[in-house]
Image (cartoon, rainbow, N blue to C red):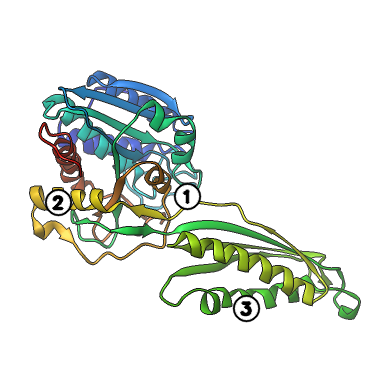
Amino acid sequence: MSGAAPVTDEDFVALRHRLHAAPELAYEEHETSALVASYLSEWGYDVVTGVGRTGVVGTLRQGPGERSLALRADMDALPIEEATGLAYASRNPGKMHACGHDGHTTILLSAARQLAASRQFSGTLRVIFQPAEENNSGARTMIEDGLFERFPVDAVFGLHNWPGIPTGQFAFLDGPAMASVDLVIIKIHGRGGHGAKPHQTVDPVVVSASLVMALQTLVSRNVDPLEMAVVTVGSIHGGVAPNVIPDSVELQLTVRTFNAAIREQIRQRLTALVESQAASFGASAEVFYPRGYPVLVNHAAETEFARQVARRHFGEGRIDTSLRPITASEDFAFMLEQRPGSYLFLGNGDSADLHSPHYDFNDAILPDAARYWVQLAQDYLATNAVAA
């Protein structure tokens, strides 16, 4: 991808379409990163590439202000075959911008250009273009690569488009906003044999069937009813024929919570339950419990600051108050564990849902979304700014 840097709103819509047509998966965002870096450099940013493998950080300093702010966008696509039929649909088979990261990147680039052109702030602005948000912990990879030591900031903000919220409406969630997510892989080991002689076997299929039902008690009988948790068995694999009892069965689960203590409680109870259930049938079990993304917790002062930016510059009528905490997960949570900040949501209107092969980012929200980042940066880095 190459070409002249975008200037007008129409140019940025065209850029979004270019990005949409050329999606790149986690840690493969080489062309996207190169394009982002070239534009930032042209606009006067100090640019560092290769942060967290394929991430880009641009820095712009202006005036004597001592405060520093980071705005973050994600760049990666999903392994989905696009079915939109759009003129600018993905040209890369099996890859698609089905979550709007092409839009998020475009929004931040548009804001970065406006801020570089106006220079109406005092302090340090950093724009973070992150790889690998989709299940690959790009935020954590950037942090492990020294993101906040190499590019220190006082606060960090991010946003996500959200289908179902009216087009262009802003939504803010205080405290726990998006759930943690953990993958659990359970392997039940029995003793296989002929389907006509089950008494000579230890049937892992029966163990698994019992276990699926027992797992439902983790939430209903272990978690405080005023808390929230989800335990979903999404995959069961075992056996190759109807008359053969297999030696083993594998189950894969997703576990989601809004509370770190509940997250750990479920891990402990799930492991104990699986092992005891298997033993009760004479089988054995292995539990693999790789940690996923933590709970995304928005900081109170920064979230209120972000809300006031929307109220001040767009009006009370542009703030949607219907959004509730989201059981999906987001690796911006790692950044909020390191620095104060907030993750907000912007209405994508009545579009297909995220991760759908029919989804498309709503171009109508690009100008105001970019203007929001501009206003937030200018307010946060104002000459007379006080702590958020």
**Counting residues from the N terminus, which is met first, the one under dot 1 or under dot 3?**
1
Residue 59 image position (x, y, % from top left): 28, 25
- With 277 as the anchor, is 122 left or right in this view? left
Q: Amino acid at mark 1?
A: Ile
- With 258 as the anchor, is 217 left or right in this view? right
- The quarter of the picture where the N terminus appears is top left
Q: Amino acid at mark 3?
A: Met
Is residue 68 among the parts visible in the rendering?
Answer: yes
Residue of label 3: 213
Circle on res. 291: none
Q: Residues within 10 Å of mark 3 (few under 14, many from 20)?
A: few
Residue at coordinates 43% horizontally, 59% vertically from top-left?
A: 179
Query: Can you tell which quarter of the image residue 119 is in?
Result: top left
Q: 157 or 305: nearer the eye?
A: 305
- Mark 1 vs mark 3, CA separation in Å: 31 Å
Q: Amino acid at mark 2?
A: Gln
The correct choice, above or below, for 344 with respect to 200 in the image is: above
Residue of label 2: 308
- Mark 3 vs mark 2, CA separation in Å: 47 Å
Q: 248 or 257: nearer the eye?
A: 257
